[in-house]
Amino acid sequence: ESVKVMNSLMVYKKTNAFDIVPHLSHLLSHDSEKVRIEAVKIVKRQRDPKFLEQILKLLSNETRRVKAEAIRVIAVLAPAQKKELIRPFLQSTDPGLVCAAITSLSYEESQDGPAHKRLQQLLALGKIGPAPERRETAKLLGELPVQYHEHLVTYLEDSDISVQKLALFAAGKSKNLMLIPTLLQLLANRKVRIEAREALIQYGDQAVPSVRKGLDDYNLPITIRLQFPRLLRLIGTET
């Protein structure tokens, strides 16, 4: 049943072909974690405050992934209360909840606010932090203001492939031009080549000058230069 429900939710996400609001309360308590997560995301898009009470309950009696999505929704449904409700999660032992709280609070806080201070603590650890923390921080950086994107280089060069892949996805979201040289270098790494290519495709035409320049740069390893013609074709297809 959960597979059918998820398929219906994906159809709704693409088409808005039916009224989902009457079903949301049930979906938020569905047996499948994936369904509950998608339902929380839909509540965020709907911005309907009548679901606030149900979302708040998820914070105390749910899986970590559902809780993280719920934190992000509270910032939308209850902006006047979000500091009071979300700040305690900055001190959570779960890095996913910490990063969800930072995402929800950082855009409206000053640079010396609690969310930014907690972020600086994560960034200060960098590559020596625990792997789960590095993964969550890598994901987080793609959602933050541009001044934090430079820190993605640390995670793009991480020794843990799972961290690198999340950092590549974040880089694609950020479309920060300063990251392009690092992304091009990662095309030589077979373990993350697909993710590096996908990140560069997200840049679209912004990546083309660097790729074309690289075609004629004989100082680059042949393993990287061989990737460029296909990459240019894919960028052209996407744009």
Image (spheres, rainbow, N blue to C red):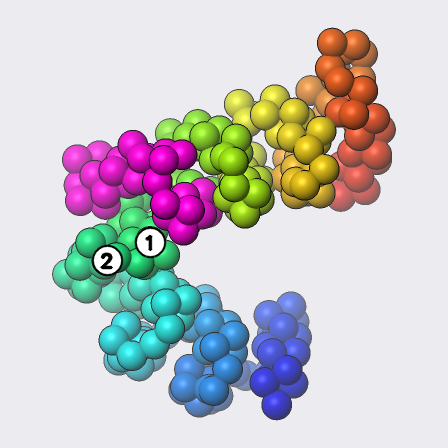
Looking at the image, which residue is at 59% across and 25% down? 182
In the image, taking residue 176 as reference, residue 234 lies left or right, namely: right
Where is the C terminus found, in terms of image quarters? Answer: top right
Q: Position of residue 68 (x, y in %)?
A: 36, 63
Magenta segment's dominant SS is: helix
Is residue 116 highlighted in magenta?
yes
Q: Position of residue 86 (x, y in %)?
A: 22, 60
* Label placed on residue 6: none
Alpha carbon distance from label 1 to label 2: 7 Å
Name which quarter of the figure residue 128 lies in: top left
Specify the amino acid type for callout 1: Pro
Q: Residues within 10 Å of mark 1 (few under 14, many from 20)?
A: many
> From what the image shows, is residue 146 above or below residue 167?
above
Specify the amino acid type for callout 2: Ser
Task: Return the residue nearer the eye: 28 or 15.
Answer: 28
Task: Return the residue nearer the eye: 47 or 102.
Answer: 102
| Residue for badge 2 | 92
Is residue 141 highlighted in magenta?
no
Looking at the image, which residue is at 68% across and 33% down? 189
In the image, taking residue 137 as reference, residue 85 lies left or right, namely: left
Q: Which residues are magenta?
A: 111-139
Q: Position of residue 10 (x, y in %)?
A: 63, 73
Where is the N terminus found, in terms of image quarters? Answer: bottom right
> From what the image shows, is residue 213 above or below residue 101?
above
Looking at the image, which residue is at 30% across and 49% down? 102
Q: Position of residue 161 (x, y in %)?
A: 57, 43
| Residue for badge 1 | 95
Do the residues bearing badges 1 and 2 touch, measured as CB atoms within 8 Å? Answer: yes
Q: Residues within 10 Å of mark 2 (few under 14, many from 20)?
A: few
| SS state under label 2 | loop
Q: How many marks?
A: 2
| SS state under label 1 | helix
